[in-house]
Amino acid sequence: MPTRRRITARNARFQQWEALLGNRNKRTRAKEFLVQGVRPISLAVRYGWPVKALIHDGRRELSPWARELLREVDAEQVAMAPELLAELGEKNESAPELVAVVEMPADDLDRLRVDTDFLGVVFDRPTSPGNIGSIIRSADAFGAGGLIVSGHAADVYDPKSVRASTGSLFALPAVRVGSPGTVVDWVAARRAEGQPIVLVGTDEKGECEVFDFDFTQPVLLLVGNETSGLSSAWRDLCDHTVSIPMTGSASSLNAANAATAVLYEAHRQRLVAARRA
C-alpha cells in the first residue's frame, strides 16, 4: 500500500517541493520536478516515468481521473491544504486537483532511438524554458526521435518548459549535454553502426532553402540560440545549412517557430515519400 500523509502547513516537506519550482540546483540534486494537468500527468504515467508522489486537494471531491491515479500509481499520496497546493500549482485563485512529483531520467543520449528515418533536434544554448517546451511539443508532433539541449542553457525541467511541452516531454526523450563534443562522439558511434546521420543547421544564409533539402535521410537538426544563433562550434560541425524563406518585415523567426517550420517540412517530405512507396 502506498504511504499516505496529510500536509496542512508549510512544513519542511512542502518547502522541498516548493523549491523544485524555482531552484534549478535543487531540482538537479533531488532529480525530481513537479507536473500538473490531466494530459501531462497521464502521459508521464503512460510512458513509465517514476512518480514519487501524488499531491491532491485534501478538501474536495476528486474526479474519477484523479481517483484512478491514486488507486493505480505506486506513489506516496499526500492530501494537502488547497491554499498550499495552489502555491505548488503556481495558481493564485484555485488549487489544481493534483500535482505529481516525477523523477528525472538520466541525461543519456542513448535514450534517443536511432533508425533509418531518424529525425532529432539540437537546441544550442536556449535561454527560454518556454522555447524548449515548445520545440519538444513540435518535435513530438512531427515525428522526431528526441531533443538535445546543448551548453549553458535553460532547464528542460523548468515549470515553464514542462507546461509548454503540454505533456510531450514524457513521450519524447530530451537530453541535456554540456558541449558539442558529447554529441559529436554519439553521432560518430551511430554512423559507425551504419546510420548515416546528417547534421543540418538552420541559418538565414543557408546553402539552400528548407524546401530544397532532402529531409528523408537520417537528420540531426541544429537550432541556434534565440539571440545569437548557432555557436561557431556548431556551425563548423554542420554538414549542411538551410534557410527559411520569409516575406514581410520580420527579420527572423522565434527559435521555436523556426524549428517547427523545419520539422514540419521534414515531416511533409517523409509523408510524401511514404505514400509514393
Image (cartoon, grey):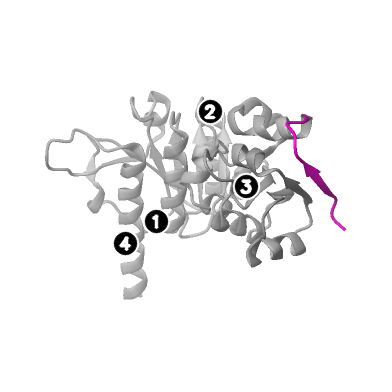
Q: Residues within 10 Å of mark 1 (few under 14, many from 20)?
A: some
Give the extent of the magenta segment.
1-11
- Dot 4, how many residues are within 10 Å of its Cα: few (below 14), some (14-19), or many (20+)? some
Identified by mark 2, the residue type is Ser
Among the two numbered marks 1 and 2 on one chain, the one whose residue lies closer to the N terminus: 2
Magenta-span inclusion, residue 5? yes
Q: Is residue 271 above or below residue 93?
A: below
Most foreground residue, 211 or 91:
91
Crowd class of label 3 (few under 14; some 14 to 19; many from 20; radius 10 Å): few
Q: Earlier in the sequence, mark 3 or mark 2?
A: 3
Sequence-earlier tag: 4 or 1: 1
Main secondary-structure element of the magenta-colored stretch? loop
Q: Position of residue 169 (x, y in %)?
A: 54, 49
Q: Which amino acid is tagged 4?
A: Arg
Q: According to the image, label 3 marks what residue? A: 110
Q: Which mark is residue 179?
A: 2
The residue singled out by tag 1 in the image is: 217
